[in-house]
Amino acid sequence: MFEEVRAWRHALKKVGSLRGWDTRSSSTSHIVREVTGIVVKLKVNHVHKFPKKDEAKEGIDKQVEDMMDLLDLEVSDVRIVGIWGKGGVGKTTLAKVIYEQISSQFDSCSFLADIETTVKQLGGFQLLQSKLMCDILNREYEVDQVAKGVDFFKGILRNMKVLIVLDAVEVQSHLHKIVGEKLDWFGDGSRIIITTSVKSVLPEFISQGLAHAYGIDVMNNDQALELFRKHALRKNLPIPDFDEIAIGIINSVNGIPLLVEVIGSLLSRKVVEEWTALKELILQSGPHIEMILMASYKELTKEQGEILLDIACLPADVDCRIASFMWHDLNIAPSDGVDALHAMSLVKIGNDNELVMHRLLREFGQQIIRKEEDLYPGTRGRLCNLDLAWRTKKEGTDHLNFDARDFKSMPNIRFLILDCAKVVGDFANVFPNLKWLQWRGCTRDFAATNFHVEKLVILDLSWSKVTEDWGGWRKIKMPQLKVLNFTGCADLLISPDLSSFPDLEILIFERCSRLMKLDPSIRHLKRLTTLNLRFCDELNMLPIELGHMEALKELLIDNTSIQEIPVSMGYLEKLEIFSASKCLQLSHLPDSVCGLTSLSVLSLENAKITQISASFEKLVKLRILSLKGCRWVGRLPDSICNLGNSLEELDITGTGISELPNSITCLGHLKVLKMDSCFIRELPREIGNLVNLEELHASHCRSLKGAIPTAIKSLDRLRILRLGHSSISAIPLEIGSLSCLQTLDLLWCNEIQVLPELPSRLTCLHVSSKRMEALPDLKDLVELEKIRLGDKDPKELICPSTRMEPKSRSSDLLVAHIVLPKLKMLELSHSRVSELQLGHGSLSCSHLKKLVLSGVNLENVLDLPSSLSVLSIQCCSSLRQLPAVHHLSKLSELHLIQSAVEEIKGLQGLISLEILNISHCEICNLNGLGQLTDLRSLILSDCNSLGGLPDISNLKMLNVLVVQRCSMLVNAREKAQSKFRMH
């Protein structure tokens, strides 16, 4: 392989001659703490300002749409959707985009990255299970054994709707250990997404009807060319001389997105001759991924190359602001180095400032490191315990043991992972260049001597047994330390003496569940910028020495027992972020807080504070203020208007505020206003002055009455308007002018009688009112994807009898004609609707997935689209016949409740049906039922006209059969007792 690299280097001379522009304990529980720590993400903010970059998402819109169809979130089953394809085609990127897009629709979520690399580590499966539980429960959780983890899953996850992403699963048994074999660990509606390059991981689940596979192929030429242009030309415009070459390059690398991005970035700002030379080179040598990546690597400066190789060895998705301390001695600003790598498509920066490197690039970097060590022994600068894991396997131990001799030949080591390791012996002059030491799971005893790491800047002791009098504090010399991480160190009761680390900038005590006190030596940390005390449950006070940390920019005390803030906090003139969410004992903020003139984010969610000082006007840089759940706060000060040039987000959800001050309309930069579940009685008449407002949330404000002010017409940027479960009585005509409005929620606003013309860009419309006599005009709302319309809540209509008489005169009845090409969900509950039409000529709701209908006068339903996955008909006492359903081959759930339907014509055609629920209906027969081989759940209740069941012996997937109070039904128990449970 390395000979190929040499050959590639030699061949690159032709390109280079052309002129262009420059440009990882001894006990199991110990290991578990360590293991959990690996996967708890460091969430800190630091002084270094790196550019925030979104991952490339070009060309995946269709893939996202296809995945959403397979996930089918409107269905309540549990399923896996597997994304498979060769390396570099964008499987992980697609999974991340989907995760971002749908995570808010689940009770809890977890993204487990790079499964196969993790399971190779000591205690790998416990690590994954611990990570999963930390994410799902949002707190520390230890898994001592895989079997114990499984037992816990079954007890907790079964009651939750969760989203789990498993990235890079290559062995089926690994998938079984994480999600089981039948997906019966998870609550209804849960979804598991996996990425894999091995298609054989999924067939067992697919054969059970538990999974779908989605194959990602390489991009077509148009998509690849667009992506290539973006990276090579920084715009998607055709340039004749370059496009022909670009197409040749794209074809030669088979349209693999990773390679398209890397080559495109490599050729950016280069002349056509260089494009041609590289194209010929690829055609001659073949599209070897390693060679192409080497070409890009050779373009880097020495410093940029060092940063790239460091990132290849650092923990996945590490915060780039922490990693930057590794590179301060290079002849380049760390931010510039990372930015250059991003421009070359060799690294991406996530929304949380995490460094993201593709697995193929990470393997490439590690390969370069190994080869260079082979060529130049003793020059290795990075080492993780995976390199020495063979010792553990050979000796059969549960932990790693090292002495100084193991490292004598590595004087240049800069990054070292010693997770769950013991070190003994004299380490004098062993680590003269070490800058980052990850020692998660470190034992309580420290046996090494002369452990001097003069250049160490990052020490990670997460999930360790260290205490305030740990021997390492006396024996380890690290005068230049910048980052000290104690995440999950449960034996730490008092913070250690920190006076020996005057240069410390980031200090993390997150999830130190028994920490009760911070040592006064913290006053010596004059350069500390971040102090993270989140989830330190026993911590009930902050030291008065806090005010001496004059460089502090971020103070995080969320989920602690802190009762008061010291007055000295007012001296923190550089503090930008103060987060005290869920500090349930915090009842007062000192006036000195108002002197924090640099404060940008203030979060006091669920605190016991009773008022907001009028002096808050001094916080002239405040962008985000969250008082969510501060139910004792009854008003906002009038002086809030003085934040007009800074405040962008205000959240008073669940507070006792009943009236907004008139001065709130002076907040000209406000983008998000949240006041759900408040006692607000009216919206400000001059609300139109909030010209930058994008989101207005006032749901469940039951005291909110009257009409929406006409001034709302001036909110040109408003995208989301939520007023559901309020007493709003009228919507102004002017709402139609809100061209950016996409979501309008007026659910159970029972005073609304009619809706005016609505904005054409709406994608989500929720409107229901007991006084709404007419349906809104929807024909021009062609962007609509979700609709909920009604004048009755179906739950109010359900009663023991199936006999519900229509209450409207025929002259008052309505025909609902809905033909919207992008519609995916329709819930219609209206007592006056007699007929529903979902098609017209060649037009139909061809993307409709979920249809929920209720209404005592509904007699006819026409044109059910073949795209349906869920069909639910409730409380339709006039609906005696369904349209034919034989063509609904994608339907997975059918619910008939409290309705007069007598027959389901074409039932045998529902080949994908998994759930059939019929209750309080006049159904006479279920002909075709025995052919529904995918059926998992059959519930028949109070169907007194049902005289029998067909043969269901072929329903091998059926595991729930409930038959109750069906007086005419006979022989069903005899037919099923050998296989199914009866209730």
Image (tube, rainbow, N blue to C red):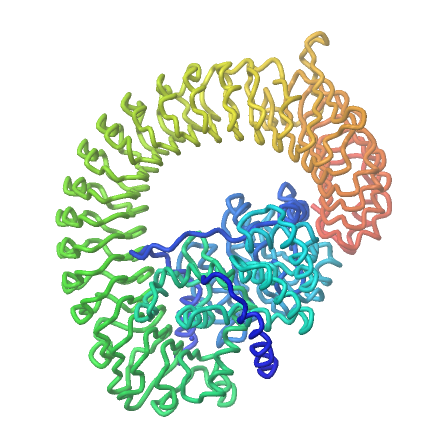
Residue 322 visible in the snapshot = yes
* Residue 977: x %, y % from top left: 77, 52
Q: Is residue 284 above or below residue 807?
A: below
Q: Is residue 772 above or below residue 338?
A: above
Instruction: Give the side of residue 886 with respect to residue 544, left or right.
Output: right
Q: Quick one: which residue is furthest to the bottom in this view?
A: 405
Q: Quadrant of the C terminus?
A: top right
Instruction: Name which residue lies at 61% across and 69% down.
Output: 174
Residue 163 visible in the snapshot = no
Instruction: Name which residue lies at 84% across and 39% down.
Output: 948
Nearer to the camera, 569 or 746: 569
* Residue 113: x %, y % from top left: 52, 63
* Residue 803: x %, y % from top left: 71, 21
* Residue 226: x %, y % from top left: 62, 50
Nearer to the camera, 969 or 621: 621
Nearer to the camera, 757 or 903: 757
Q: Quadrant of the N terminus?
A: bottom right
Q: How many marks?
A: 0
Instruction: Give the side of residue 475 with respect to residue 172, left or right.
Output: left
Residue 434 lies in quadrant: bottom left
Nearer to the camera, 40 or 295: 295
Residue 590 lies in quadrant: top left
